[in-house]
């Protein structure tokens, strides 16, 4: 081996946690293989400031090394860091040598090839100032030679290869596994401090303690240097990176093995409360009580579960053995599905039904408004024309009457329709009908075609509503058959479900669908009793009445409820917007339908039905009042104008009187449906006394007046005069009785005496017996006393 300069290893003070447990302890002075002399590299160490800096480095390293563990390094690192100093001096290397670090012997082999060059540089750059420092540490550290280091290294590797562990005699704290893979290439292995990471501090020897004391003394005379701190930090970071790199895959197993060996020690300093037998017994009893309570609750739950299991098994067995219950369940389920589908279908179709119903109602209202407006316009223009004629007659001028084109056209239209009606009466053989009693409801051919076309389009859309629906969901008879089966099989559940209250609501859309083309004001309109839905409901109710157990069955109210909720609202719309009280045919048909409805209500009286009845009667009374106020007009002309029965004034007055008398008759036709006081107020108080009597007083006494009085008396209901003890007529007829007496008085003094008997018969009919007797006695008409006695 070539000339190798002597090296001096100095220990660096670091935290105990970074100590290398695998580092060989320093040999004692005088031990074999150690050399006490210093190399020439340290003889050239500069004196003064350099020596102070070298002494200061260990002190700063100790201050920064606390908490980071002990870091092991060789003099090679100090030599590498030396050229970075100013002037190429080896101050950093000398400082590393003065830090007195314990070096693993394994690192010397790696650095052996570099020491000769480093020592030559050290010799050239060192001065005599390092001789004193070398003499100071020579007595403390003896450096082994290369042969000793090589032999020791091989011995350790051989021990690892054979026994896979390091003997405790070598004084290692533990070995690192995985070193065998590097034994094949010993020269390429890194230094010992790169492979072995210490985890426990090693006891210091006497020399180490002396070196530490010497370094402490040198720290007092040194000064901090920012540049030294910088290079010291760099050096420490390099060492830490090398250590982490080597032990990256090994430290995890070591940590787990160390933690597994750790045993938690018992702390004897903790004091416990005194233990008493009574306390232990009490705690055990408490614990036993809690466990017993829990056990009892578990037993109760267990028994409950057992009972539930038994009950479920019994129910399953009963259901399996009983086929009737299975069938019952299937029936109820099928009814539930059927009703849900029926409701869903009706919910979707009710919108279309309402649209068609509204369209038809609007068409009929439009037609009724046309008739009403035309009658009022014609009455106004004809009256104005006659007034102009009266003024012309009063002025006795020969100038022609100026009539505008509209009035002329209206008068021609009026006369044309009257001629057609007279021709129709002649063909039918009814020649006794008076002018003014016919309903003026004829439409022109163009208007009639438009009406029929619109009505046909609505009815065509009406047919398409349920064309995609099965009969079971749109045929009322099929729907009621489903519920009839339920009532026959399970009557208890049927009545408990209040099906009688649900059926009218379910049938409401379907009945309204059938009533779209129904007009109760038309003469040829089908009656309610002939409608399919009416007969189907009657059959359903009759089947319910056959059940003797349900004599007071709620199904009896189904028909009356349907009428109250469906038919009466429909009929009310006709009364309010379409019905013409001056039309006898419309009034007669409406009375027929209303009478049938009230008869059905009479069989089942309740608040709902009474309310529906009142809802229908109120608009009837209101519409008749409006007709009296708007449509009755009987003008009064001078006697000279009406003497000629063929004059336009006389004809117009006669037509208006008979028109008023026609309304009077139509009003009194409601005598069995409306209350008597209401009819007497409308017919007698508002119409007879206000219009008809005044027209009769203005007329010339004669057979025509008696004829008119007979027609008025014929309209009066016989029900009002059925009381045999009645000698005086009702108060509202007092004016009519006085007019009869005046007419009889005038006729008795004239040549027309046969008409007096007719007047006495009228007085007897209306129960004005006292007035008739007084008149007979006054005018000595003894031959008429027999008329009174016959009553």
Image: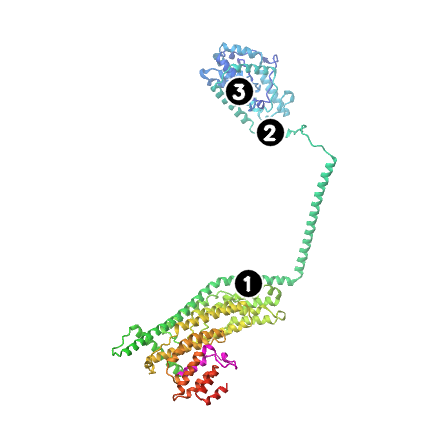
- Residue underneath mark 3: 61
Q: Mark 2, residues whose alpha carbon is within 10 Å: few (<14), some, or many (≥20)?
A: few
Image point (60%, 71%), residue name = 545
Is the residue under label 3 in contact with that under label 2 (CB below 8 Å)?
no
Where's residue 92, x and y in %?
49, 17
- Residue underneath mark 2: 255
Where's residue 584, x and y in %?
43, 76
Check residue 339 in the rendering and tell me which mark sits there, or answer none.
1
Camera-side residue of 175 and 413: 413
Classify residue 715 as left or right of residue 390. right
The total number of labels drawn is: 3
Camera-side residue of 781 and 409: 781
The residues tagged by marks 1 and 3 sit, at their Cα atoms, a distance apart of: 96 Å
SS assignment at label 1: helix
Q: Is residue 2 magenta?
A: no
Classify residue 200 as left or right of residue 96. right
Which residues are drawn in magenta? 705-733
Q: Mark 3, residues whose alpha carbon is within 10 Å: few (<14), some, or many (≥20)?
A: many
Is the residue under label 3 in contact with that under label 1 (CB below 8 Å)?
no
């Amino acid at each position: 081996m070539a000339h190798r300069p002597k090296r001096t290893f100095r220990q660096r003070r670091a935290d105990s946690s970074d100590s290398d447990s695998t580092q060989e302890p320093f040999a004692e002075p005088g031990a074999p293989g150690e050399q006490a002399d210093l190399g020439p590299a340290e003889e050239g160490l500069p004196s003064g400031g350099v020596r102070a800096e070298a002494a200061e480095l260990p002190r700063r390293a100790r201050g920064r090394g606390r908490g980071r563990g002990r870091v092991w390094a060789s003099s090679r690192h100090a030599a590498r860091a030396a050229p970075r100093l100013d002037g190429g001096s080896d101050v950093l290397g000398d400082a590393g040598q003065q830090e007195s670090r314990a070096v693993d012997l394994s690192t010397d082999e790696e650095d052996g090839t570099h020491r000769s060059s480093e020592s030559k540089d050290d010799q050239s750059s060192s001065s005599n100032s390092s001789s004193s420092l070398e003499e100071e540490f020579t007595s403390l550290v003896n450096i082994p030679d290369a042969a000793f280091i090589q032999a020791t290294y091989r011995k350790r590797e051989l021990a690892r290869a054979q026994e896979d562990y390091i003997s405790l005699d070598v004084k290692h704290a533990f070995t690192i596994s995985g070193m065998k893979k590097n034994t094949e290439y010993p020269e390429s292995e890194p230094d010992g401090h790169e492979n072995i990471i210490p985890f426990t501090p090693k006891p210091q020897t006497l020399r180490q303690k002396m070196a530490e004391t010497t370094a402490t003394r040198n720290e007092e005379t040194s000064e901090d240097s920012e540049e030294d701190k910088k290079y010291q930090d760099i050096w420490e970071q390099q060492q830490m990176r090398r250590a982490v790199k080597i032990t990256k895959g090994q430290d995890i197993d070591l940590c787990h093995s160390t933690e597994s060996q750790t045993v938690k020690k018992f702390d004897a300093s903790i004091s416990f409360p005194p233990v008493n037998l009574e306390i232990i017994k009490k705690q055990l009893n408490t614990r036993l009580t809690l466990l017993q309570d829990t056990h009892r609750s578990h037993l109760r739950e267990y028994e409950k579960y057992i009972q539930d299991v038994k009950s479920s098994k019994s129910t399953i067995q009963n259901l399996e053995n009983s086929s009737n219950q299975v069938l019952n369940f299937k029936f109820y389920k099928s009814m539930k599905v059927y009703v849900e589908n029926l409701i869903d279908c009706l919910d979707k179709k009710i919108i279309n039904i309402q649209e068609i119903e509204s369209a038809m109602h609007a068409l009929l209202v439009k037609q009724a408004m046309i008739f009403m407006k035309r009658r009022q316009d014609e009455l106004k223009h004809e009256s104005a024309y006659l007034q102009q004629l009266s003024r012309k007659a009063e002025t006795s001028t020969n100038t022609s009457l100026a009539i505008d084109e509209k009035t002329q056209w209206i008068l021609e239209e009026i006369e044309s329709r009257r001629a057609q009606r007279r021709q129709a009466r002649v063909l039918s053989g009814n020649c006794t009908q008076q002018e003014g009693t016919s309903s003026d409801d004829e439409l022109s051919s163009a208007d009639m075609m438009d009406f029929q076309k619109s009505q046909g389009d609505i009815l065509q859309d009406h047919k398409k509503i349920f064309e995609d629906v099965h009969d079971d969901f749109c045929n009322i008879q099929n729907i009621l058959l489903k519920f009839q089966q339920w009532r026959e099989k399970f009557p208890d559940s049927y009545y408990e479900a209040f099906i009688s209250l649900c059926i009218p609501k379910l049938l409401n859309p379907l009945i309204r669908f059938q009533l779209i083309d129904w007009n109760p004001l038309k003469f040829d309109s089908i009656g309610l009793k002939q409608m399919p839905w009416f007969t189907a409901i009657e059959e359903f109710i009759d089947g319910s009445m056959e059940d003797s157990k349900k004599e007071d069955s709620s199904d009896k109210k189904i028909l009356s409820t349907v009428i109250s909720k469906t038919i009466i609202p429909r009929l009310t719309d006709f009364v309010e917007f379409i019905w013409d009280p001056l039309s006898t045919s419309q009034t007669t048909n409406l009375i027929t339908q209303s009478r049938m409805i009230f008869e059905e209500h009479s069989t089942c009286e309740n608040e709902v039905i009474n309310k529906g009845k009142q809802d229908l009667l109120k608009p009837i009374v209101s519409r008749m009042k409006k007709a009296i106020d708007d449509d009755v007009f009987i003008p009064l002309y001078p006697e000279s104008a009406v003497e000629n029965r063929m004059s336009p004034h006389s004809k117009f007055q006669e037509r208006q009187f008979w028109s008023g008398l026609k309304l009077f008759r139509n009003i009194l036709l409601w005598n069995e449906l409306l209350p008597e006081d209401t009819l007497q107020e409308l017919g007698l108080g508002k119409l007879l006394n206000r219009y008809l009597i005044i027209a009769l007083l203005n007329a010339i006494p004669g057979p025509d007046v008696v004829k008119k009085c007979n027609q008025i008396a014929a309209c009066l209901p016989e029900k009002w005069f059925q009381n045999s003890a009645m000698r005086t007529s009702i108060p509202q007829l007092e004016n009519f009785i006085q007019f009869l007496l005046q007419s009889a008085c005038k006729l008795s003094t004239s040549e027309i005496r046969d008409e007096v008997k007719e007047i006495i018969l009228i007085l007897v009919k209306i129960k004005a017996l006292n007035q008739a007797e007084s008149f007979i006695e006054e005018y000595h008409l003894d031959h008429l006393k027999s008329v009174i006695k016959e009553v």
